[in-house]
Amino acid sequence: MNPKIPSPDKELTYSSYLKVKDLLSLQKPLSNPVAHDELLFIVIHQVYELWFKLVLFELSSLVSFLEKDELIKSFHSLKRVSEIFKVLVQQLDILETMTPTDFNKFRSNLNPASGFQSLQFRELEIISGANLSDYQKFAPLEPEWMGKLQELNNKGNLSQSFKNLLLKRKVVEDLSPEKLQAGLLEIYQNPKHQDLQALCEALLSYDEQLSLWRFRHVQMVERMIGMKKGTGGSLGVSYLTQTLTKRYFPELWELRTHLSNY
């Protein structure tokens, strides 16, 4: 009787599906002897990149949904992204269990790497509606950035897709500041546009949550390094503070001022 020949393909398991072995092999501290909190630092930032990957996937889908006027799907993606950003903020609380003294035990090993080199976060900003020209200053850090950001920029962004939807719905005739403001006022004053008003509020919440994450991130960095320069030679807190004014839906924020007159 011939022995049973095993299948060349192993049975799928939790670990093989999630590539757990590969995943857990990616945390490699550089300090020697290994600083206790370096593993925490690595895990938190790797998890951030995984969340950024999912956010980019959802925002890319959202751009497509808005172009097709599929608002139910749009609300679903915005809700998911909203919940992810709550987690992103909470992760900073975990990181802040590390003291500045503990961070300084391995900080020098990070040079010249810097959080400024997170391509995925730059992609997140571009797909939200950031101006591509603002990123030329980062080209020396990661030369291949601009090609990738340009390619993403060519696919459209959340801000533009929202405005295209207003054109498609004939809420605005064109995208001049005056017509856009008038159209947004119409959305908030006319009950027949309740779905668009809900979309405006969801997009404003996304903009707000992104700002809240920036603010908490600035606080965390200042708590760890004060006003020192970043590991990659960046300006650190002084630069990060400048980013707090970034908004991807300024028209929706400005609208609040005009609504007070009604």
Image (cartoon, rainbow, N blue to C red):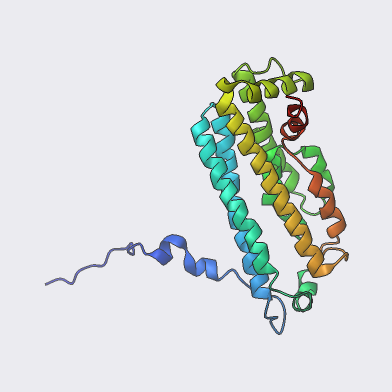
Query: Can residue 139 be seen from the camera position used here?
Result: no
Locate residue 91: give its quadrant: bottom right
Q: How many marks?
A: 0
Question: Left or right: where does residue 252 sit relative to residue 244?
Answer: left
Taking depth in this image into account, of 90 and 10 the one nearest to the observer is 90
Q: Residue furthest bottom?
A: 33
Please provide percent x and percent y for residue 225.
82, 68
Please provide percent x and percent y for residue 237.
84, 59
Q: Quadrant of the N terminus?
A: bottom left
Question: Left or right: where does residue 177 sit relative to residue 51?
Answer: right
Is residue 245 positioned above or below 261 on the image?
below
Taking depth in this image into account, of 119 and 186 the one nearest to the observer is 186
Locate residue 216: give its quadrant: bottom right
Tell me which residue sits at (69%, 20%) in the image. 183
Please provide percent x and percent y for residue 88.
63, 57
Taking depth in this image into account, of 163 and 196 the one nearest to the observer is 196
Tell me which residue sits at (62%, 52%) in the image. 85
Locate residue 89: give its quadrant: bottom right
Query: Can residue 219 be seen from the camera position used here?
Result: yes
Is residue 119 positioned above or below 171 on the image?
below
Question: Left or right: where does residue 94 sit relative to residue 136?
Answer: left
Q: Quadrant of the C terminus?
A: top right
Tell me which residue sits at (71%, 51%) in the image. 212
Q: Residue furthest left?
A: 1
Is residue 59 positioned above or below 238 on the image?
above
Taking depth in this image into account, of 259 and 166 the one nearest to the observer is 259
Tell me which residue sits at (66%, 20%) in the image. 186
Question: Left or right: where does residue 196 sit relative to residue 8?
Answer: right
